[in-house]
Image (cartoon, grey):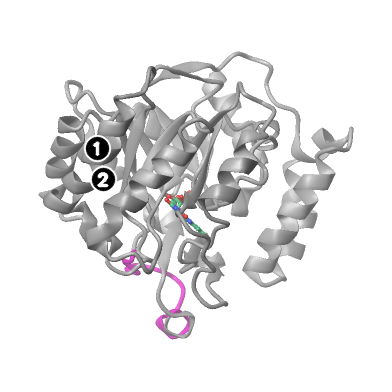
Amino acid sequence: MADFYKQFLKPFLFSLDAEQAHYLTFFLMKWGMKLPFYEWITGSLPRQDFSTDIAGIRFPNPIGLAAGMDKNGVLADLWPQLGFGFAEIGTVTPRPQAGNPRPRLFRLPEDEAILNRMGFNNDGLQVIARRLAKRKNRDFVVGGNIGKNKDTPNEAAAADYLSCFISLQEHVDYFTINLSSPNTPGLRSLLEKEPLQKILEPVQNQNFKLYKPKPVFLKISPDMAAEQIPQVAEVCKTFGLSGIVATNTTISHEGLKTTPELLGRLGSGGLSGRPLATASCRVLKALRQPDSGLILMSSGGIMDEQIALQRLQDGASAIQIYTGLVYQGPALIKRILHQLKG
Ligand SMILES: Cc1cc2nc3c(=O)[nH]c(=O)nc-3n(C[C@H](O)[C@H](O)[C@H](O)COP(=O)(O)O)c2cc1C
């Protein structure tokens, strides 16, 4: 059945503008997955129990949907039907925002990659919190990936993260603080020690007032200097974070098969998919230390079941997928689960 996606749906979707294809896919999922025979298209899932405890939460399995695919949480109840054990909703910002002008999402098929400069387009905190409050499947794990509005100056960023945390705390199972998108100007500079402390401290002060504090992760960039990685990990430990999501997209365009002329025409953006795998894995390994106390989620270039399993063997407790789903379709999740079954 892989191949209903690869043979029929993908060629059609890839003939459309990438962002239009995204919305059409969401429409098809919303209505198509109500049909009794949708499993015929997506393939049936192994019935085995893959559940695992991560940061005190029971995850149905360690394969997650990465942030950015369901920015507004509109399909939060449907992702488990594709086999995902969790989905990270967002990035959510306090106020709704339109993101960058279109076109802002491009496929690079020769590289099995995506280039995007979406710029945190989302419905805003209040609408998304109300939507998540209505979700039905409470066994499924939902993470809230939170960010700052584009027009919030970096000096005021901490207040944006805190208000996202407060409004979503009842509606998500864990949080990811996103300081690593390349598409919000200056955001990545908040990963420096001092601004990072200023953002994490108020969130964690609020969090530790809760009867049951939420696991909080920090999502980092693959473009950080090697020396910065242990420094960021240290700050995360100091503020009692549960772990790190490594990594977001890269601004490096090195070694691509896509021609420099085409890249020049497409313009700036973060690169995801196959070419990101090496950098993402390098950051994962740099973070891996048995006594660090930090839980690692790996994201970046997980395009097949071998890479998925390797990340879990390399120290990730969970993995997150975006671009692999676009190129391989839902069969990828099923194949990873079969591989996990061993
Ligand atoms: C179109 C697009 C939008 C994204 N938006 C977000 C986002 O809003 N927040 C975030 O933390 N990551 C975002 N990401 C990054 C993904 O969550 C993921 O970390 C990255 O794409 C690497 O994984 P992949 O190679 O499996 O795609 C986005 C990625 C893509 C392709």
Residue position marked by numbered label 2 in the rendering: 282
The amino acid on which the numbered mark 2 sits, given as a three-letter code, is Arg
Horizontal and vertical percent position of residue 132: 61, 38
Is residue 65 toward the left or the right of residue 147 in the image?
A: right
**Residue 327 can be seen, yes or no:** yes
Mark 2 nearby-residue class (10 Å; few <14, some 14–19, many ≥20):
some
> In which quadrant is the N terminus drawn?
top right
**Residue 307 can be seen, yes or no:** no
Q: Would you say residue 333 sits in the magenta stretch?
A: no
* CB under 8 Å between discs 1 and 2: yes
Is residue 320 toward the left or the right of residue 189 in the image?
A: right
Q: Secondary structure at mark 2?
A: helix
Kindly report the distance in space between the C-alpha atoms of the residues bearing marks 1 and 2: 5 Å
Q: Main secondary structure of the magenta part?
A: loop
Q: Would you say residue 255 sits in the magenta stretch?
A: yes
The amino acid on which the numbered mark 1 sits, given as a three-letter code, is Lys
Is residue 163 toward the left or the right of residue 283 in the image?
A: right
Horizontal and vertical percent position of residue 112: 52, 59
Q: Nearer the viewer, residue 189 or 156?
A: 156
Residue position marked by numbered label 1 in the rendering: 285
Q: Which residues are magenta?
A: 251-263
Horizontal and vertical percent position of residue 169: 45, 33
From what the image shows, is residue 181 above or below residue 84? below
Residue drawn 75% across the image and 28% down it: 44
Is disc 2's CB within 8 Å of ligand 1?
A: no
Toward the right, the furthest residue is 36
Q: Nearer the viewer, residue 175 or 251?
A: 175
